Amino acid sequence: MNETDNLVLEQLRALRNEILAFRSENQSEFSEIKHRLTRVESSIASMRGENVGTQEDVYRQQGVIDQIKERLQRIEKRLEIAAA
């Protein structure tokens, strides 16, 4: 019985060591995945911010174009060269 107990204990220790190694490896990989996910989220947030900025630029440019069109129409009207 003593030898059987020793075999069981030896197997249990081996299993415990494997579990600890597996847990340590998984924690390391999980930390790396979390870090990479954070970088992806930051990149997405940055791209969204750039997209908002680009959209604002388009709106601002459209406003400037509208002002230029109005001024051009007034000039054409004064010079009586407006297309009828």
Image (cartoon, rainbow, N blue to C red):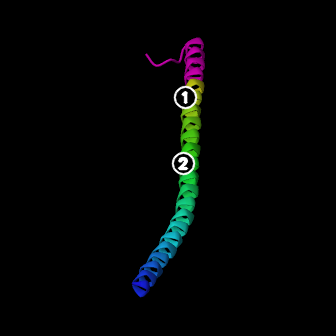
Lower sequence index among marks 1 and 2: 2
Residue 41: assigned label: 2
Location of residue 41 with respect to 64 vertically, above or below = below
Residue 60 x %, y %: 59, 28
Residue at which label 1 appears: 59
Residue 33 x %, y %: 53, 59
Q: What residue range appears in magenta?
A: 66-84
> Would you call the spot at circle 2 few (<14 residues within 10 Å), some (14-19), or many (20 or more)?
few
Between 57 and 4, the one nearer to me in the picture: 4
State yes or no: discs 1 and 2 in contact (Cβ < 8 Å).
no
The residue that appears at 54% across and 48% down in the rendered structure is 41
Residue 7 x %, y %: 42, 84
The residue that appears at 48% across and 79% down in the rendered structure is 14
Determine whether, in the image, residue 15 is placed left or right of residue 48. left
Q: Amino acid at mark 2?
A: Glu
The residue that appears at 57% across and 51% down in the rendered structure is 38
Q: Main secondary structure of the magenta part?
A: helix
Location of residue 53 with respect to 69 vertically, above or below = below
